[in-house]
Amino acid sequence: MLVLGNILRRHARVRPDKVAYVIGDTRVCYGAFNAAANRLAHALRAVGIGRGDRVAILADNCPQYPLVYFACINLGAVLVPVNTRFKDDEAFYVVDHSASALVLFGAGYAEMVERLRGQWSHVRRYQSLEEHELEAWLQPYPTEEPQGLVDEHDPHVMLYTSGTTGEPKGALLSHRTYYLQAAQSHHATGLAEEDVGLSMFPMFHMGGWALPLGFWYDGGTVVILQRAEPRAMLEAIERERVTYLYAVPTLYHRMLELPDFDRFDLSSLRTLASGTSVMTVEQITRIVDRFRTRRLFIIYGSTEAGPVAMLRPADLSRKPTSVGRPALNVDVRIVDDADGELPAGAVGEIVCRSEFIMRGYWRMPDATAVALRGGWLHTGDLGVFDADGFLHIAGRKKEMIKSGGENIFPVEVERVLMDHPAIAEAAVLGVPDVEWGEAVLAVVVRRPGAELTEADVIEHVRARLAGFKKPRHVGFVEALPRTAATRQVQKTLLREQFAAGRLSG
């Protein structure tokens, strides 16, 4: 069976002394990795965690995070990573909605957990992941493999992602799904045991789990950064002789902007990859020239869909603005609003079908039925196939903003803005941004006689939502443009006005 725990067990037997991952000053070999994950699995079982139970984790990237993943995997439990950028209300929702029975928390999050613990009715235990506290908890438990029934179709992780209603949705991903994703990474990009990958994603993110797993599948090594900081990335590449670098366009831009970029020894790199937003020809050219390798993969996918399409290095020069052809073992179609397939050259919604897609949304049967109707995952993205079968992204069907690799739904920000006593109306939309791909624009109508500055608006959102959701631009208008019949805000006009510099109010 394609059960993820088999990956770690295999390497613990075959290459126990090979370094599996590096975080900060900590280096963990496969043998010790497996033994520690087993101990944690026994400890979880002792407090009542078993197959299908949800375990929430609120922590920055730390040596304990991968152990938690595999401990849950070994029990058939479902890990629920919580975005560490969330404010109290956002974190509360994820743990409460998932009905998690246990909350594991890292350094720096004890105060948030203390504030919320009385409100989580499903949680039976809270456990710190700080090294001395975790070791005290695990001390009595053995390192032998825990016995229990785990099926490859069981979910092993629930990743919360903003949906078309603005409410976060818990996407359930199975063992089989991620096992096959790891195998696909191996075949598509040529990963091998000798590779050393750099993971810049937080481990609560899809990429922060899927990317390391791709290297562990092959018995390679992953350098997991505690935070995505450009200089730290370059230092890690040089120090650890990294061979594979995946970074979002924003971070490539920031690394290349460092005045001493050329002093770093990046000669170990043989493969680059990127995704989350479409890059310009100029950006791609700059990356391959400055990093001195044309082996750059552009990967398009999502939490719910997994890998969807890939642009291979051989096609960079002739199709630089596409995201490539459908990924290995993935069927992709472009459909109209009635789910009718469209021909090449026609723009429609991107839908896909593969072994990589989610099982569904936790406790949201209606949303699941809509997303997976007809057996195809509906991405909500608009795209078009060209005559050569290459996929091009055309925009967002539901106005989702993608900024620096994070999804932002305008309704959530609009609701917060409307809580401000000086704001009469507000509309939020995404606008192009060289660094972030897209940036949040808030267009605001002041209440009569109210005084309100751009800084006031930004701070109001920043204090209530994760920092990446705050507006980077604020425009003031006398009234929002609306359609005559339905009174819907015409965001296309607002976007045009912003581009023309006419949102000063």
Image (tube, grey):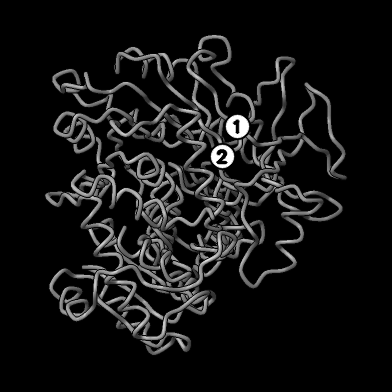
Looking at this view, is 106 or 277 the one in front? 106
Q: Is residue 449 visible?
A: no
**Relative image position of residue 2 (x, y in whole percent):** 52, 53
**Are dots 2 and 1 in contact, CB under 8 Å?**
yes
Horizontal side, residue 386 vs residue 282: left or right: right
Horizontal side, residue 162 vs residue 80: left or right: right
**Relative image position of residue 359 (x, y in whole percent):** 64, 59
Give the class, few, some or many, for how many residues have Cα within 10 Å of label 2's Cα (few <14, many ≥20).
many
Total labels: the figure holds 2
Q: Which mark is residue 361?
A: none
Disc 2: which residue: 307
**Which residue is pictured at 37% across the width and 61% down the height?**
70
Q: Give the residue type at disc 1.
A: Ala
Looking at this view, is 116 or 472 the one in front? 116
**Is disc 1 placed on a helix, strand or loop?**
loop
Q: Residue farthest to the front?
A: 13
Q: Is residue 276 visible?
A: yes
Give the class, few, some or many, for how many residues have Cα within 10 Å of label 1's Cα (few <14, many ≥20).
many
Residue 302 appears in which quarter of the rendering?
top right
Disc 1: which residue: 327
Query: Does 188 appear above or below 444?
Result: above
**Which residue is pictured at 46% across the width and 69% down the height?**
90
**Relative image position of residue 262 (x, y in whole percent):** 18, 18
Residue 172 appears in which quarter of the rendering?
bottom right
Query: Does 457 appear above or below 281?
Result: below
Which is nearer the N-term, disc 2 or disc 1? Answer: 2
**Is disc 2 placed on a helix, strand or loop?**
strand
Q: Give the residue type at disc 2.
A: Pro
Q: CA distance from mark 2 to mark 1?
A: 6 Å
**Relative image position of residue 272 (x, y in whole percent):** 37, 25
Q: Residue farthest to the top?
A: 318
Q: Quarter of the image containing the C terminus?
A: top right
